[in-house]
Image: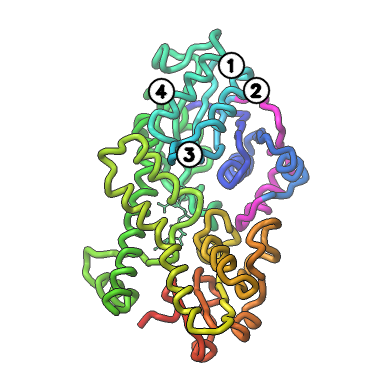
Amino acid sequence: MEEFNTISVVGLGYIGLPTAAAFAARKKSVIGVDVNAHAVDTINRGEIHIVEPELDMLVHAAVSQGNLRATTTPEPADAFLIAVPTPFSEGHKPDLAYVEAASRAIAPVLKKGDLVVLESTSPVGATAKMSEWMAEMRPDLSFPQQLGEASDIRVAHCPERVLPGHVIRELVENDRVIGGMTQRCGETARDLYRVFVQGDCILTDARTAEMCKLTENSFRDVNIAFANELSLICDRLDINVWELIKLSNRHPRVDILQPGPGVGGHCIAVDPWFIVDSAPEQARLIRTARTVNDGKPHWVIERVERAAKRFKEPIIACLGLAFKANIDDLRESPAVEIATKLGESFPGQVVAVEPNIRTLPTGQHSSVRLCDLQTALAEADVVVVLVDHKQFKQIDPVRLQAKVVIDTRGLFARS
Ligand code: SAJ
């Protein structure tokens, strides 16, 4: 069993910061590294720069007890976890620039016996590439691609799988898939995660672990696309899709997900493209699912525009801007895309209700006015339900009677 006294987490975002705090809660000495000086200063004050339930308390405790410290410059440690973004660039090609920068940044402080784990969601082959970048910088050390089990540095991939909004619980309880570049690399990484993970830590190779994470999110994307496609078909055939899905799900082997205004977030709408990019000819269903889900916001916009034409100067109320229920995260949100486009088509006539934020991000969505739920319901001719926030579930349907309601989440249209 390996002992890790000092652990460094590189990238202190939605995954890196909770992970750093989880190790610190187990009394490990944790050094968090981030290029964002504002994030580093905030964490060193015991505060957080992102929104995630319970994270503030954990970080505050970790910093005040001296177990977590943040810095912009990497320092020596026994294990390094890299949790930086892996977005896609032009043509949906994975962009590994942050992984490359992070691995080159830690390379100078690596020493014999260290473990480096890539946590970022990555295309197949990224862990091996990361190891090559470090090897380039440190010809004095050996890496698994050069010496196999005998290497000085151990390298593994262990994708994060936590659900935003439930990160603290899922981080501890979820099973972890650990892909070592060699068997020993995997076993060493497993010793590290066992510090705080209560779920099973299952070993495989790095490429399978990379593909496993992409597969999980693609599975979800394909299944949401099925529900979204059904919603279009049912609209055409004048069938209530929510009732249809509920009835179909009575079958013991059928479990259809829910249609919505499209798929948001930073994972499910991104990761399938990594598979498509690496096997474009084979990944036909996965690519089509992306197209179906990306097309849904346009379909919603068209429906609202058609409905709005019935009025002279309609007020359109968009209920919800976040990418899913009961969170404040507006990034990559189909609801934002829909509200913004409607605001452009109907200047001064679109209001949005988002109970989880106080102001709209500056410089964006200027065509949309943020207001409270009661005002929106009083003013609106057309109500577009975009997010199933708990506050919206309490709306008395009587208040919607005289309005046109376009309900993308089935809050009021279920039967
Ligand atoms: N959505 C639907 N219908 C559904 C379920 C979801 O339209 O029936 C939409 C949501 O409204 C949202 C999007 O899909 O816009 C994604 O939401 P989500 O709750 O399904 O997933 P995320 O993006 O918050 O988190 C996912 C999770 N992956 C899986 O469930 C397979 C999480 O475990 C991953 O860690 C995370 O991606 C990630 O970081 O990759």
Residue type at tag 1: Lys
Element under label 4? Answer: helix
Q: State the residue position of label 1.
A: 111
Q: Earlier in the sequence, mark 1 or mark 3?
A: 3
287 relative to 95 in the view: left or right:
left
Q: State the residue position of label 4.
A: 184
Q: CA distance from mark 1 to mark 2?
A: 8 Å
Q: CA distance from mark 2 to mark 3?
A: 36 Å
Q: CA distance from mark 4 to mark 3?
A: 37 Å
Element under label 2? Answer: loop
Q: CA distance from mark 1 to mark 4?
A: 17 Å
Q: 119 or 105, which lies in front?
A: 105
How many numbered tags mark residues here?
Answer: 4
Q: Nearer the viewer, mark 1 or mark 4?
A: 1
Range drawn in magenta: 50-77
Q: CA distance from mark 1 to mark 3?
A: 37 Å
Instruction: Check residue 73 for magenta coloring.
Output: yes
State yes or no: Cβ of the residue under disc 1 lies below 8 Å from any atom of ligand 1. Answer: no
Q: 113 or 379, which lies in front?
A: 379
Q: State the residue position of label 3.
A: 90
Cβ–Cβ below 8 Å for labels 1 and 4? Answer: no
Q: 221 or 302, which lies in front?
A: 302
Q: 281 or 209, which lies in front?
A: 281
Specify the quadrant of the image occupied by residue 261: bottom left
Q: Residues within 10 Å of mark 2 (few under 14, many from 20)?
A: some
Element under label 1? Answer: loop
Q: Residue at x 66, y 35 (%)?
A: 34
Q: Residues within 10 Å of mark 1 (few under 14, many from 20)?
A: some
